[in-house]
Amino acid sequence: MQPASGARRAVTAVCLVLAMRAGIAFGQAEKTRTHPADQRATSSGDRNGSIDVQQDDLLKKPVAEDWPSYNGDYTGARYTSLAQITPRNAGRMTAQWVFHPRVVSPLEVTPVVVAGVMFVTSANDAYALDARTGDVLWHHVRAVSEGLIDDPGQHHNRGVAILGTRVYMETDNAHLLCLDARSGHLIWDVPYATGNRNYGATSAPLIVKDKVLVGTAGGDDGVRGFVAAFDAETGEEKWRFWTIPGPGEKGNESWPGDSYLHGGGATWMPGTYDPELNTVYWGTGNPAPDYDGSIRPGDDLYTSCLLALDPDTGALKWYFQFSPHNLFDYDAVQTPVIVNATLKGKSRKLIVTANRNGFLYILDRTNGKFLFGKSFIENQNWAKGLDANGRPISAGLVPDEKGVRVCPSDGGATNWYSPSYNSATHMFYFRSFEACAVVQSQPETFAEGQAYYATGIQTGGEPGKGYINAFDLDTLDFAWRDPQFGRNKGWGGVMSTATGLVAFGDDGENFVIADGRTGKPLWHFHVGQLIQASPMSYSVEAKQYFAIAAGSTVFSFALP
Amino acid sequence: MAAFPPLAATAARRLPGLRKICTQVWSLRTWDFLPLATLLVFGFVVPDASAQGNAGAQGAQRFMEYCAGCHGADAKGGDKGPALLSAANANRSDSDLFRIVHDGTKAGMPSFAQIGDENIRAVLQFLKVLEDSTVSKSPSAEAVTGDVDAGRALYFGKAQCSQCHLMQGEGGFIARGLTKYGRNRAPDQILKAITTPDTPLAPSSEVVTVVTGTGQRLTGVLRNEDNFNLDLQSEDGRYHLLARSNVTDVHHTGHSLMPRDYGARLSPQELNDIVSFLIVASKNPRPGPVEHPVANDQNATR
């Protein structure tokens, strides 16, 4: 399950005076056409304003001036090499601008920035902004879709992918749109999840080579999850990996009859990509129905898994299942971060990920083998621990009509908000949440147009407690854990910088810059809205900015 | 054209409460302003609405008060709300439309129950009048008089429209997309826009030449301008994001990139063919959604 939307902020008669064109003198001089010589002169030197994303731009790591995809670079580390803002001067940061898009629900977008142009989405709308000023360069308008339910019905959208001069986004009703990045005009529109109207999408696409990879939402509503790849030029579908095996396939024994068509395993966050191993890593969501496992015996492959897929063919290389036969809505879509590090004395290619089920995992990303696991919450009662292969040792809790108290709660010990890995200090940062919930279950039949949880969470649940964590890969232990105070449970992700900073949204509606060694806050800004998105950093004209979406607004900050 | 700003200013002076809206209307929709200027100055009487009497005037007034801020003064859509003069709304029943205004929508429109049922009905009546005077002007695909195929060939060939204008996924980017352009426009309106462009100049379309502090000359379309910044886009697609403090001269040309000699370059027949193509194409749902075969169907093996 994705987070419930906060209070819907109805937009009332907002008068935006756009493009006030003072100074236009009608009937002024005549010569109008652009002079090619002038263009050549201006095209030399820096590339500011020229949107043309090449493979090299996407492969660059860590990110610097540009932040060309949802997680910045392909590793998912959300670690920038920009070094203008440091622990010494961060306290002097100030707000640079505020952008208020047409909004129907709290923003979950991570802005993408290329050559000084920022791309953000709000529901089905996309915008290009002057990243220095927040001024709108173009706005692609598309109404929200009627008739959607659950998460897609809240019209969340996490942003764009970009390749060449084209921008790609998913719509609430699971269409893949291709827009011209220079104008916002629609080039093509491909509906990619049909046959069950509970499908929808909330994620940002991922570009891998010449393809656009997308996933689906609706995993609590009885859809059949998949990762699909489309030709970036034509929109033609190239492959599709179904996360719920069909008849005759390995793992189908969990899905009697046609239940595989409603088994969940949604893919509602972008994956990560290792070009050397030619592998994409993509997390899958909970099985459906969420809380009634009686009709899906066995492990329920490939739900609550990390999939290693061949980006050219969609073939499954390996999988690792975090929560077999899950009964508590423990999606495994949290960013699988690609890390090269020494583990227990040996140099390794790793995946590091903090899972919604309360365990932090380190896997060998060449073969999916479990290398290390550790609980990161104090109250953990659904599993007694992990065995030598990383499989949880079940505590035997089963939701029933009366309800069973489970920790972590259905909202997860962590969730889709981004983690971050600082490759210089080997520190892995992430937000966690300590909470328990009483889960009730009764049998339910799948039907289009309604959710498919098979009951839910007892109301009046226990208040939880949020933490920002720093896990040290050298010591395999926590360097610090900072409790969060505030009125709301925060949904803000984390990023880190080469100067040792961590940036995150806290539980008190503040955007915070802290010292990554200690967690000590160095600066904060009260955005006055619940932060339900992950931060990013970019640079234009040698000036470093941090940007984050909060509530109905995108904020940008920099040194004065 | 030059007469517009004083008219708007007069309206704003006479109706101080509407000054903000007038400013907004002026900045957003100069080229569609004339009927509204008339409306504002002459007591909200839309010519076509005269038969509606006081109710029509009341509807216009309430529309400006409560709706125009989001849906645009011409109801063709604004930054915060969609176009209201749409085929979808034309097909909605009166009670459905009433409910939408009264209760708001899931998509984010707030409830306007507080303005009272009578005012809601007046607004809806006003919109019906507007709809009759605009939506119905675009003829059906069958009723166009030109050769649509010839118009398509001209658009992508000799007339060079596609160099700048995207149509159903094909064409340039520097000028507005024309996929839906003909949907709500009459043939004579489209013809006028082709043969006498820049009357008036659409916002964010003006070509300017800027000289920077280092003496560099930049020419492009002025996408944004305020007291502090200028955003130009040159024909190669590049955005030039400039601080005004680094600019020594800005020359406004008063024109867009649209050639002004189509009336001479193309015959009346050719122009009519292009107009017909724009209208027919706008009623076709492409560029999307395009259905491609699913690469690995639900029952296929992996």
Image: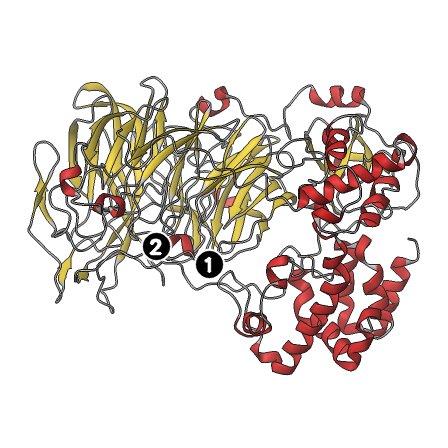
Residue type marked 1: Gln
> Residue A77: which quarter of the image?
top left
The local crowd at label 2, few if under 14, some if 14 to 19, many if 20 or more residues have their Cα within 10 Å, is few
> Residue A228: which quarter of the image?
top left
Cα distance in 3D space between marks 1 and 2 = 16 Å
Task: Judge from the rendering whether residue B233 lies leftward or rightward of residue A191; answer left or right.
Answer: right
The local crowd at label 1, few if under 14, some if 14 to 19, many if 20 or more residues have their Cα within 10 Å, is some
Instruction: Provide the residue designation for mark 2.
Output: A3
Q: Residue at x 64, y 42 (%)?
A: A138
Residue B11 percent across, percent down from the top left: 85, 69
Residue B234 visible from this viewpoint: no
> Are both tags, 1 and 2, on one chain?
yes
Is A533 situated above or below A247?
below
> Residue A370: which quarter of the image?
top left
Q: Secondary structure at mark 1?
A: loop
Q: Earlier in the sequence, mark 1 or mark 2?
A: 2
B133 or B220: which is nearer to us?
B133
Label annotation for residue B300: none
B192 or A325: which is nearer to us?
B192
Quadrant position of the C terminus of chain A in the picture:
top right
A344 or A206: which is nearer to us?
A206
Specify the subunit that label 1 lies on: A
